[in-house]
Image (cartoon, rainbow, N blue to C red):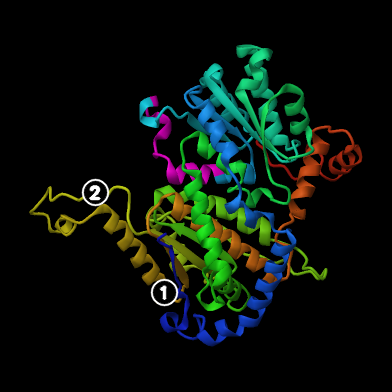
Amino acid sequence: MESLVLDYTLAMDDALGEKQGVSRYILEALRIPLQDARDHLLARRREGTLAWTELPRKDVRGVLEYAERVQGRFENLVVLGIGGSALGTTALATALLHPYHNLLPASGRAQRPRLFVLDNVDPDQTQDLFSHLDVRKTLVNVVSKSGTTAETMAAYLIMRDLLEDQVGRGRLAEHLVFTTDPEGGVLRKIGRAEGIQMFDIPAGVGGRFSVLSPVGLLPAALVGIDVERLLAGARFMDEWITETDLVYNPAYVYAALQFLEHTRYHRDIAVMMPYSARLRDVADWFRQLWAESLGKAVDRRGRTVHAGTTPVKALGATDQHSQVQLYAEGPDDKFFTFIKVGEFGYDLTIPDAHPGAEELSYLAGQSMGGLLNAEQRATAWALARRGRPSVTIELPRVDEAGLGQLLYLFEAATAVMGELYDIDAFDQPGVELGKQATYALMGRPGFEELATEIRAEVPERTPYRIERK
């Protein structure tokens, strides 16, 4: 399998100078902490407490058999989820489906359904989607490990009501598939009682690490993505990371650079900028993975650290015209990850439509992919000239194997970063309080005291409101 390439030339002092760039000496000084990180992660893996690392080797026959069984039966697939229950699916679809998949006729989609991922509780968006779908021809994948995710379950209850009205309670189970906890939770209980097809989110796999589980693989298989090839790419990357010395290890070098840029050079914003429209939602998926894993108040010893860098997404070349002015001349507080593609699925040759126009003739005969990659290289170089560091990850092409490598690389690097910060990269205490507050304000039993506390501290109408009378 052809591997991706991690090029960190423009993060080093050779390119940026000793005050702005990382030296080989500084990088080498991290060898012992990186080795400790590796030893700890491998020990946890042997103990079975890093369940996401086993996903590339999981048996997916059940997913494939179900996808084959329902092929051609539904025009629409609606995925109801939020956060890690939706972002991975969106990233896979954007990268690997035709960009206008939902506009193609059924024959152009190989009889696969159109895909809609509903990951919010905006009532306008929800109504606009549900009112324009023929729910009699729709399969609904509800994704929630606990079965209590307020946003997902609200959408499920509304869609369930529509389905009951249109297809009847007796055929409801045909139109629903749950991806949830293998043992407990309300979705598991409902699924068992009503004979609804269910797939397991493996124990110990958090939402942000779940893209290679049925959370991402089921909808991917249903719309025709080669999930076995995706997992093969992830296995390839896992073997590379597990078997390779730290100096030549893409996950450990990437994590080391991110850690040094933050702790030594005080660059606390991590910008991811793919130069491929197909990869734009990988940056969105990465934002949750990075932010939720690494943004922690305390370390494992209980010390206050407020760890983590802020992930920001951009798209090349689009954001050269909206963000790069800030990146080049604003605060030097950013570390850039560029993603480029070696071989595009299509490459358009630019014609010489105006031979007499020198301002345009230089483009004649050039490829559009060549132009996009030249813009990536030029942006990275221009930032380096201003002392702004970056790494470039090159995918051979945007396909299942390459994407599997890329996603697993970022998951592994995130885990290594957690070790370097000495934090728990797999919990999310900052999210839980907000969830509990939502339950309280919506009247969920057991949260009455918290609701009273919130309403006392932040009343519906505060004294600090400005409005025109």
Q: Position of residue 251 (x, y in %)?
A: 55, 67
For the record, the magenta segment spans 89-106
- Look at the magenta stretch and give its main secondary structure: helix
Quadrant of the snapshot with the N terminus: bottom left
Q: Position of residue 98 (x, y in %)?
A: 39, 39
Question: How many angstroms separate mark 2 from mark 1 (CA)?
Answer: 30 Å
Report which quarter residue 439 is drawn in. Answer: top right
Q: Which mark is residue 131?
A: none
- Mark whose residue sits in front, 2 or 1: 2
Amino acid type for the residue under numbered disc 2: Leu
Q: Which mark is residue 384?
A: 1
The furthest residue to the right: 449
Q: Secondary structure at mark 1?
A: helix
- Which of these two is toward me, 423 or 442? 423
Asked if residue 228 lies left or right of residue 413, the reply is: left
Q: Which residue lies at the image location 50% right of the left edge and 80% below the top edge?
A: 20
Amino acid type for the residue under numbered disc 1: Ala
Report which quarter residue 384 is drawn in. Answer: bottom left
Reading the image, the residue beneath label 2 is 348
Q: Which residue lies at the image location 39% right of the left edge and 52% below the top edge?
A: 318
Count of numbered labels shown in the rendering: 2
- Which of these two is toward me, 144 or 371? 144
